[in-house]
Amino acid sequence: MRDDMFDMALNDEQGEDASVGYEALFRNTPVAICHLFNRTIKRCNRRYEEVFGYEPGELDNQSVRVHYPSDELFSPFGRKYGHFFERGHTFKDERPFVRKDGTLIWCIVTGTLLDPANPKLGSIWVVQDISEHKRIEDELKADVEKLEIVVQQRTVELSRHVASLEEEVATRQRAEEAANENREKYQKLFHMLPIGISITDTHGTILEANCQFAEMVGVRRAAPENWRKLPLRFFLHDGTEIPRHRLPWQIRDFQKDSINNIEIGMRDEKGRKLRWLSVSSSLIERKDQQFVVAAFTDITYRKRIEELERLRHAELTRLGRINSMAEMGAALAHQMGQPLVSAVNYLNGCMLRLERVDGVGEISESMGLALKYLEQAGEILRHVKEFVCKHKPDKEPENINEVIQDALSFLNFEVRRHDVSVDLRLLQEPPLVPLCKVEIQQVLFNLMKNGMEAMTSLPPEARKLVIGSEIVDAGGAMKVFVQDHGTGLEKRSAKRVFEPYFSTKPDGMGIGLTICRSIVESHGGQLSFSRIGKGGSRFQFTLPM
């Protein structure tokens, strides 16, 4: 009996100690724990209160609704875990809760019945605050998403670069194929061109030349040649020989990177002229090397044509002078007759006076006048001969005033015949002008004669011919003008005044002004015409100085 009582006492003592231990463990455990009955917090430990931000005992007998942000979250959860306890013993879920101060936290809640056999005793819930873990997880998730975006972007960029690289490779392959094709075309074109082409280094060695160049100059395409060793002589248009080491297409200082259309003659060693060449070249710099590409065009045939044209032009101008002399034949005969008849008369007078010894003084004066008129006749004949005969059309520095006065003296008989007054407006001490004197005199002769004939219908006092010279173009050219005060030309005729075979004279051939313009242009100048007021014409031409 006493033993049973002792056991009972011992059990009661042990039960009381266990209850005290469990209570201490419940209060002081670092895990948030609460006892729920019908979704009401019967009691909770201090850690639970700290998690949700409440004071001790403040949550006792409070509905768990205070932990939910809204009714929409509170109501479904009650139904969910209630039915679960009908099928199992432990419930675990992750959800958001709200603290007393309104902040939202994420928690893992784990619930179990105190006694599955007696559900009315309620349930025990353990709450773990995982907000920090959730935040870190969200950050990790965001970082993962960002990383995935970056990876996707890098993948897209890499794909784009790969595609661009593939396209570049394909483009380079096409470019290389096109370059090879163009190289073949270039080689064919290079050797088929009708002009000679050479490529030379800075030492004058011909690196490459086409067939036409080899035929033109006589180099072998199979082996490189040096310009200095070629059996050729080069000279300028005036005959000045060019040393081989001073060929202009080889010297950078001379050509200043390029030269255009320099005309050079070429002979062989024996001095026989082979041909004329027009040379153009350009300097090419590639990396640390320099090359000269030169093009040679054979202009021998053109030179021959130009020489024939020059001779034809000279002959044509001479024929123009002969034609002018034909027009002047009658007047010339009349004017030549006058001094000759006067000379004869004076000489006859001398003979008569010699018969009378007392006329010695008068004889001397008569003889002097006779010589004067005979000299005048000889001067006229000399001018006619110089004007008509052939001459070399070489340019010499001449005083333009003297040229004008000589041409005017040749027309003295025309001045007297047409009763024209001449007004000379010449420069004082003009600079010398390079010209062919006979050809420019022919121009002046035609312009002066035309001016005199244009004033035939005017009264003598109105027949005035103005001839002048002046410097124009800032001293670069000399201008000579012949101005009359005749009836002038109509606008329609003025436009055609320089056309070949156009003439306003009934017996004119229409080649005088055409020849004049050709002569002036061959001197590098220009011949022009302008109307003066209601009547009168002004012809003027320029000569470069």
Image (tube, rainbow, N blue to C red):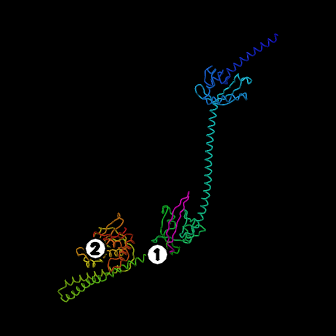
Q: Residues within 10 Å of mark 1 (few under 14, many from 20)?
A: few
Residue ID for mark 2: 487
Q: Which residues are magenta?
A: 273-298
Residue type beneath disc 1: Ile
Residue 507, horizontal then vertical, whole percent: 33, 80
Residue 415, horizontal then vertical, whole percent: 27, 77
Give the side of residue 310 with respect to residue 232, left or right. Answer: left
Residue 105 or residue 439, whichever sits in front: 105
Q: How many marks?
A: 2
Check contact, mark 1 vs mark 2: CB within 8 A. no
Residue 398 or residue 95, whichever sits in front: 95
Q: Residues within 10 Å of mark 2 (few under 14, many from 20)?
A: some
Rendered image quadrant of residue 498: bottom left
Rendered image quadrant of residue 11: top right
Let me know if residue 446 is in the magenta part.
no
Label 1 sits on a secondary structure element that is helix
Whether 418 is drawn above or below 247: the answer is below
Residue ID for mark 1: 305
